[in-house]
Amino acid sequence: MQYDKIAKSYKAQSVKTASPGKLVLMLFDGYLKFSATAKRGFDVDDLTKKNEIINNNLIKAQNIVTELQSSLDMTVPGELPGTLYRLYDYVLHQLQQANLQKKSGPIEEADKVMDELRDAWAEMLAQNPEGSQSSDPGSGSISLQA
C-alpha cells in the first residue's frame, strides 16, 4: 500500500513539473494506455465486466483526445491547427463507434492516428528541447508553435 502512495505522489509531482510539451506527450501516452486496456477488454468472458472495461477506458481515451483538441491554438497561422482538429474529430468518432458497436476495429484506426501524432510530437521535443519549455510557467495553454 505504501508503494502505491509513493507512486501516485511521484506521478503527481512529475505532472506538476513537466513542461507543456512533455504534458502533451503524457496525454498521448495516457491515451495509448487506455486504448490498450479497452482492447484487452474484448478478451474478457464476463459480458458485464467486458462492457465495463471497454466503456470506461474508451471514455478516458475520449477525454484525453478532447483535452488535446481543446488545447489547440487555432490562432497559429497555417493549416496545422485545423488539420489536427479534424484528426482529433476523426479519432473521437472512431472511439465512439467502437464503444457503441463494441468492436475493436475503430480503436485500431484511432490508434494509428494517435500513434503517429505521438511519435511526431516526441520527435519534435527531442529535436527542439528548448521549445518544449514554456516561457510562462503559469500559462495553462499549449501552443503548437515549435
Image (cartoon, helix red, strand yellow):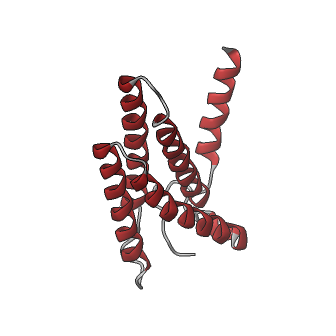
Quadrant for the C terminus in the image? bottom right
**The quadrant where residue 131 appears:** bottom right
Q: Position of residue 115 (x, y in %)?
A: 56, 61
In this picture, residue 52 sits left or right of residue 108: left
Q: Position of residue 114 (x, y in %)?
A: 50, 60
In this picture, residue 103 sits left or right of residue 30: left
Q: Is residue 128 above or below residue 45?
A: below
Q: Between residues 82 and 113, which one lies in front from this camera angle? A: 113
**The quadrant where residue 65 appears:** bottom left
**The quadrant where residue 15 appears:** top right
Q: Position of residue 105 (x, y in %)?
A: 42, 54
Q: Between residues 97 and 146, which one lies in front from this camera angle? A: 97
Quadrant for the N terminus in the image? top right
Q: Measuring 42% from the left and 71% from the top, which residue is drawn there?
A: 84
Q: Between residues 87 and 80, which one lies in front from this camera angle? A: 87
Q: Measuring 59% from the left and 66% from the top, which residue is drawn there?
A: 121
Q: Measuring 67% from the left and 29% from the top, which residue is drawn there?
A: 7
Residue found at the far left of this picture: 100
Q: Is residue 105 above or below residue 133?
A: above
Q: Measuring 40% from the left and 43% from the top, which residue is drawn there?
A: 58
Q: How many marks?
A: 0
Residue found at the far bottom of this picture: 78
In this picture, residue 117 sits left or right of residue 125: left
Residue found at the far front of this picture: 45
Q: Is residue 80 above or below residue 26?
A: below
Q: Between residues 104 and 59, which one lies in front from this camera angle? A: 104
Q: Position of residue 27 (x, y in %)?
A: 52, 51
